Image (spheres, coloured by chain):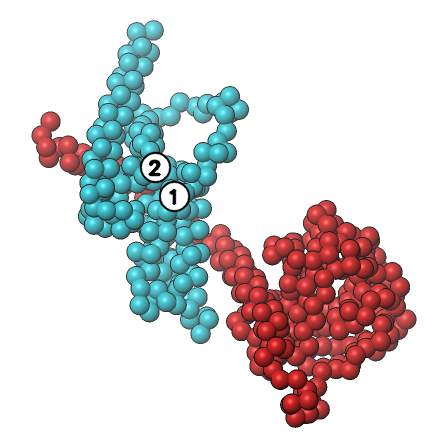
Chain colours: A cyan, B red
Amino acid sequence: MARQHDEGFRVFVVARWPSLVTTAYLVTGDTGIAEDCVQEALTRVHRHWRRLRLDGDPEAYARRAVVNAALSWRRRRRVIEVPLAAAGEPRARPEPEQTLDAQLIAALRLLPPRMRAAVVLRYVEDRSEAETAELLSCSTGNVKSTAHRGLARLRRNLESASSAATMQHAGRKSR
Amino acid sequence: MTENQVQELDAGVAERLRQLARTEADRTSPWPGLDIAVRRSRRRRRLAQGAAALACAGAMALTLPQLIPGPDVLAPAAPRDAGPPPLAPGEIPGSRDGGTLGVTFGDVKMVVQFDVIVIAQEPMPTGGGECVVFDHPAVIPVQEGQRVPSLAGFAADGCRGGIVGQPLVGAADALQPFADQPVGVDVGPCSLLGSEQVTTSGGLTATRSSFDCAGGVLQQWVIDSQLVWTLDGDERIVGLVETATASNPD
C-alpha cells in the first residue's frame, strides 16, 4: 500500500516538476531557490498525498504550496542577504541574448514579491484572476489591482533597463 | 497606450520569460533531493506522532489511576496481567515481549517502544551512574522535543532527557500497553560525565555513558542493540531498568 502510495506520488512529481519549477523560478528569479521551494512544497504534498489523491486536487495544492514557499523564501532571505561589498567579482560580460534575458529577470525581480507573483501567475502563466487569487489566497479584486500595478511597474523597469543598455552601448561605440 | 495594452504583458516578453523559465526548469531534477526531503519529513512526522502519543499516554497515566477503582473493589488481576515484581536496585528484570516504557527526564516525557525486551544474562554492574545517551542508530535521543543527532550535542547542551527507541506511530497498541508499567522519573538537568567501553561481568562489551543529573546519577549501557538504564541508589528508577532490542528504523 505504502509502495503504491509512493509510486503514485513519484508519477505525479515527474509529471509536474518542470511546471512547478517554472513557476517558482519566475517568482524567485533563481533556479536553486526555485528547486528548494518546489522540494519543500512537494514534501508537503507527500504528507497529504493519500487524501489529496482521493478527494483533492494535488496539483492545485502543490502550486499553492510552491507560491507560498517562494514568497516566504523571499521573506527569509532578506535577513541573510550578503552585502554587496562581500560579493565576488562580477562575471564576464554576458552575450547580448543573455543580457536581454537577464534584463527581463532583473526587471521582474525589482517588483515586490507578491506583486511579482501576481504578474507571473496572471500574465506570464496566463491564469485567470480567480485562479491567481486562489493561489495567492486573496480576493480577485486584490489580484486585479496588484497585477495591474505590477505590470505597469514591470514596463517601467524594462524601459529603464533598455535605455540604460542603449546608453552603455552608445558609450562603448564612441570610445 | 490603449487600455488593452495596459492590461496585457507584451506577448514577446511573456513568451521569452516562459521560455527562459522552462530552460532553467529543464536543468533541474527532483531526484535525489526530493527523496531525501521526504524521508526527513517522514522521520520528523514520526517523532511528532511519538510526542503526541506520549502526551496522551502521560495524560492517561495521570487520570486512569483516579478513575479505576482500587484493588479492594476489583477482582484480582490474572497473573499474566500483573506487572513485573519490584526489582531490587541493580537487579535485571526477566525477558518479555515488546512494549513501551514511558519516562520523564527533566521536562521531557518520552516513550521507548521495543520490539522485544531481551535481558542480559548476567547482572549489570551498577557503580557510577549516568543519564545515558549515545548515538546508537536504532535509538533517537531527544532533548526538549528536539532530535539530537549525537552524543556530542547532548554533552554540549547538557542532557535533560533520555532516549526514544522507535518513535510510536499511531496510538499505542493494546498488545503493547503503555500504561502496563508506566514509570515516570524526573532526573532534572544532566551533564555528561563520560562515555567509555566496558566489559560486563558476563564478558559482554558495552558502551557505558554516565550523566550527572540533578535527581541522581544515571547510567546507560549499550550492548549491541540492547540498552540498560539504571539510576543508582534510587528506588524510583527501579522500574526503568530495562534491556531492549529496539526495532530497526526504516
Residue at horizontal 44 percent and vertical 61 percent from the top: A47
Q: Do labels 2 and 1 share a chain?
A: yes
Amino acid at dot 2: Pro
- Secondary structure of the residue carrying numbered label 2: helix
Q: How far apart are marks 2 and 1 (CA)?
A: 9 Å
Residue at horizontal 39 percent and vertical 64 percent from the top: A49
Crowdedness of circle 1 by 10 Å Cα count: few (<14), some, many (20+)? many
Q: In this view, does B1 lie to the left or right of A82?
A: left
**Residue nearest the viewer, comparing B244 with B80:** B80
- Indicate the position of residue B223 as horizontal and vertical percent values: 78, 68
- Indicate the position of residue A164 as horizontal and vertical percent values: 29, 17
Residue at horizontal 11 percent and vertical 27 percent from the top: B1
Tag 2 and tag 1, C-beta contact below 8 Å = yes
Marking on residue A113: 2
Q: Is residue B41 left or right of residue A7?
A: right
- Indicate the position of residue A55 as horizontal and vertical percent values: 31, 68
Q: Mark 2 lies on which chain?
A: A
Amino acid at dot 1: Ala
- Secondary structure of the residue carrying numbered label 1: helix
**Residue nearest the viewer, comparing B224 with B231:** B231
- The residue beneath circle 1 is A70
Q: Is residue A68 above or below residue B67?
A: above
| Residue placed furthest toward the left | B2
Residue at horizontal 51 percent and vertical 58 percent from the top: B41
Q: Upstream in the sequence, badge 2 or badge 1? A: 1
Work out which quarter of the rendered image holds the C terminus of chain B and state it: bottom right
Marking on residue A124: none
Q: Across the whole image, how many numbered discs are drawn on residues? A: 2
**Residue nearest the viewer, comparing B147 with A12:** B147
**Residue nearest the viewer, comparing A139 with A77:** A139
Q: Mark 1 lies on which chain?
A: A
